[in-house]
Image (cartoon, rainbow, N blue to C red):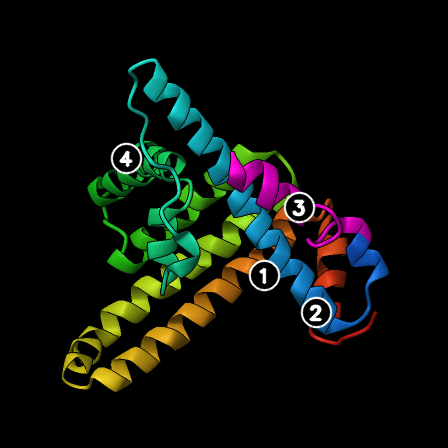
Amino acid sequence: MFKKFVIADSLALGMSLTPELAAQTHAPGWLWLLLYGYALRLFFDFSGYTDIAIGLGVLFGIRLPENFIRPYLSTNITAFWQRWHITLSDWARFYVFSPLSRSLLRRKPRPSKTLIIFLSQMSTMLVIGLWHGITWNFIIWGAWHGIALFAHKQWSDETRRWYNGLSNHPWQKRSWTAVTWLLTFNYVALGWVWFLMPTPQLALETFGKLFGIGG
């Protein structure tokens, strides 16, 4: 309850991004702070409700699964989706990603492995986007994460040997972990712009202000 009714609701009082504040704010630095506030507000709001449900379940002898496991500490987008809204992610993986992947593998001629991964990941994230609402912004938000998941898969496959070699260089590995965490968190935070804004036009205007373009 503390996360929802104290932290999340406090952030909602002018300390997190809204469409109205995005329209009124022109300083990029302040807009970034509001965006980070919104990212934190979403986490504490959603995970707070989950904690309440888990607590009520315990009272009635029902064990409910954890739904958020420190997602903003993820060092890549794949790990983020293994920690954020876990029940939804698992549902989409089971009912969209796996069946679609198997179907594509059975096709004759079989598409390339890269294409199968791209179509499966993109379709899964588009479904997750549409689960939140049938709007262009939710579709774009789903595609935003679908592209990132595909890119991370390709990157990790190509750099696995190099990354494993970092085990012999602790400081380099720590530095790389810090960099990947920073990139992941900011990519997810920027994605919330699509999630929050009611239209693509307003989202694009907000992106422009965040990076000092226009506004």
Q: Which three-letter amino acid code belongs to the residue tagged 4?
A: Pro
Where, by quadrant of the figure, is residue 204 drawn?
Answer: bottom right
Q: Marks 4 and 1: which is nearer the front?
A: 1
- Image x and y of residue 106, in percent: 20, 40
- Residue found at x 56% / y 38%: 4
Q: CA distance from mark 1 to mark 2?
A: 9 Å
Where, by quadrant of the figure, is residue 202 drawn?
Answer: bottom right
Q: Marks 2 and 3: which is nearer the front?
A: 3
2 and 3 marks in contact (CB < 8 Å): no
1 and 2 marks in contact (CB < 8 Å): yes
Q: Pointer 1: what residue?
A: 190
State whether residue 130 appears in this view.
Answer: no
Q: Pointer 4: what residue?
A: 99
Q: Marks 1 and 3: which is nearer the front?
A: 3
**As displayed, is residue 24 above or below residue 59?**
below
Foreground residue, 143 or 194? Answer: 194
3 and 4 marks in contact (CB < 8 Å): no
Left/right placement of residue 211 relative to residue 67 reads right
The answer to which of marks 2 and 3 sits earlier in the sequence is: 3
- Residue 89: say if magenta: no
The answer to which of marks 3 and 4 sits earlier in the sequence is: 3
Prevailing SS of the magenta stretch? helix
2 and 4 marks in contact (CB < 8 Å): no
Q: Pointer 2: what residue?
A: 210
Q: CA distance from mark 2 to mark 3?
A: 23 Å
Q: Which three-letter amino acid code belongs to the residue tagged 1?
A: Leu
The answer to which of marks 1 and 2 sits earlier in the sequence is: 1
Q: CA distance from mark 4 to mark 1?
A: 30 Å
> The magenta stretch spans which residues?
1-20
